[in-house]
Image (cartoon, rainbow, N blue to C red):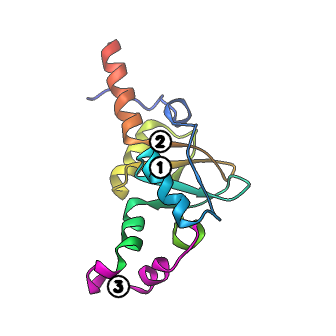
Amino acid sequence: MTENYSDILIRDIMTSDVVVVNEDAPVEEILKLFEKYHFNTFPVVNNDSELLGIIDQDIMLEIMMFHRIPRIKHTHVAAVRSLGESAREIMIPHPVTISPDENMHDATDMMLKHHINRLCVLEDGKLVGIISKNNIINEVYQRKGVD
């Protein structure tokens, strides 16, 4: 596993057909997306495809089960989120992002550093894709098979 993959750009291995949530989407619509696609996270965008935040399964579970979470987790943010009715009101703002011109090593380092499974890929402030650990693992595996 000592190969140098710094020549592999994010744009070449990212998923560009991204399922997104519009900032005005109601919570019920978001729940339907989780049921339909079985993803762990959805990017939240505005009408211009600008990334505003993300919504993950933890947020949805926290909202749905707020009355059951330990009191220590009853923060102001959790309480406000539990009352939210749209994606904009419940999302996590400022997700970790990467440029499509960065390389696979950069993405891997960021994911491991921040303990996350995917990064939103932004170009000129617009969401153009998602790069996940799965994308990276598959790319390395395919290249190993070629060797």
Residue 60 placement: quadrant: bottom left
How would you classify the magenta stretch by its main secondary structure?
helix
Residue 81 among those drawn in magenta: yes
Give SS at disc 2: strand
Q: Nearer the viewer, mark 3 or mark 1?
A: 3
**Quadrant into which the N terminus falls:** top left
Mark 2 or 3, nearer chain start: 3
Q: Amino acid at mark 3?
A: His
The residue lying at 37 percent from left, 58 percent from top is 114
Q: Residue 139 placed where, x, y %?
A: 39, 27
Residue 144 placement: quadrant: top left
Q: Residue 147 placed where, x, y %?
A: 32, 13
Q: Is residue 141 above or below residue 89?
A: above
Question: Label 2 vs label 3: CA separation?
Answer: 32 Å
Q: Which mark is residue 86?
A: none
Q: Residue 103 placed where, x, y %?
A: 48, 37
Q: Is residue 45 above or below residue 61?
A: above
